[in-house]
Image: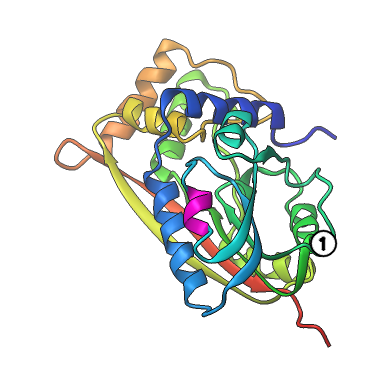
């Protein structure tokens, strides 16, 4: 059975974002929010693992809450810039019981086996440790999805364009099944407006967030591109179309030592 996501392509997408200067407005929003949540635990952590690091300054900022910070990042260039190493979250060898904080930012929505990825994270964690982070949720990019449906209608053939994403209601049970306790999942919907579909695609490219589906759609013909652009612009108000990014914030703990 073929995998949903192409991990080699994911690394290449993130490397491209690193080269063209990454768009960090969503990542930074999530990172800052999670830092606040970690601070509310009123605890100084010993050793943290940061999974996903598009900003080389993040490890320094996290070090204010943890004595030591390791970085694992899917993109080789981002990993190099942050002094970390690469990771495929459902295909790595985690150290056993090493971290009392794992902070995962914006990558777990593009792994092929999320339950396995969560179990591997759990294996790397000490007792009474915090797992916190955020990922893209199921209602992300509705305008882009509608535009791609218009493109498919223009050709008469449906093709995969946009990633499927996990629903909020499924995430807490997955965390529990992976061995975590007290999972909490919050939904945040962030809106951004664009003058054109091309503007949205440019931002997604700079986030490393364009398609990494293994089943690749054929390039859009001119008629399809025009149909997609018209559908996107038809939703505009005042010349700008508002797109929505659904973010799933999560936190859970490992069991305390009995």
Residue 92 place in picture, x, y as percent: 80, 44
Quarter holding residue 211: top right
The answer to whether residue 84 is above or below residue 190 is above
Residue 142 in sight from this viewpoint: yes
Residue 183 place in picture, x, y as percent: 64, 74
Residue 190 place in picture, x, y as percent: 36, 54
Q: Nearer the viewer, residue 222 or 63?
A: 63
Identity of the residue drawn at 39% across and 54% down: 29
The answer to whether residue 23 is above or below residue 45 is above
Q: Residues within 10 Å of mark 1 (few under 14, many from 20)?
A: some
Identity of the residue drawn at 75% across and 52% down: 117
Secondary element type, mark 1 = helix
Give the residue furthest to the top: 222
**What secondary structure do most residues of the magenta stretch adopt?**
helix
Quarter holding residue 7: top right
| Residue under numbered circle 1 | 123
Q: Nearer the viewer, residue 153 or 204?
A: 204
Q: Look at the image and say whether residue 57 sits in the magenta stretch.
A: no
Identity of the residue drawn at 43% across and 45% down: 142
Which region shows up in magenta? 58-62
Give the residue furthest to the front: 67
Q: Quadrant of the N terminus?
A: top right
Q: Nearer the viewer, residue 148 or 134?
A: 134
């Amino acid at each position: 059975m073929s995998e949903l996501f192409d991990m080699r392509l994911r690394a290449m997408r993130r490397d491209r974002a690193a080269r063209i200067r990454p768009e960090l407005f969503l990542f930074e929003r999530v990172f800052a929010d999670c830092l606040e949540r970690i601070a509310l635990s009123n605890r100084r952590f010993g050793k943290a693992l940061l999974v996903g690091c598009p900003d080389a300054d993040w490890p320094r900022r996290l070090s204010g809450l943890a004595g030591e910070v390791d970085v694992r990042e899917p993109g080789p260039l981002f990993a190099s810039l942050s002094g970390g190493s690469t990771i495929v979250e459902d295909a790595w060898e985690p150290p056993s019981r090493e971290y009392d904080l794992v902070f995962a930012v914006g990558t777990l929505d593009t792994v092929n086996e999320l339950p396995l990825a969560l179990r591997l994270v759990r294996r790397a964690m000490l007792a009474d440790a915090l797992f916190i982070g955020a990922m893209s949720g199921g209602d992300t990019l509705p305008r882009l999805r509608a535009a791609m449906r218009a493109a498919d209608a223009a050709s008469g053939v449906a093709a995969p364009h946009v990633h499927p994403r996990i629903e909020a209601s499924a995430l807490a049970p997955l965390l529990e099944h992976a061995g975590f306790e007290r999972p909490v999942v919050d939904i945040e919907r962030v809106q951004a407006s664009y003058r054109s579909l091309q503007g949205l695609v440019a931002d997604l490219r700079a986030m490393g967030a364009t398609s990494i589906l293994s089943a690749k759609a054929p390039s859009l013909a001119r008629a399809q591109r025009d149909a997609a652009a018209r559908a996107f612009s038809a939703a505009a108000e005042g010349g700008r179309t508002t797109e929505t990014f659904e973010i799933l914030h999560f936190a859970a703990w490992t069991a305390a030592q009995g």
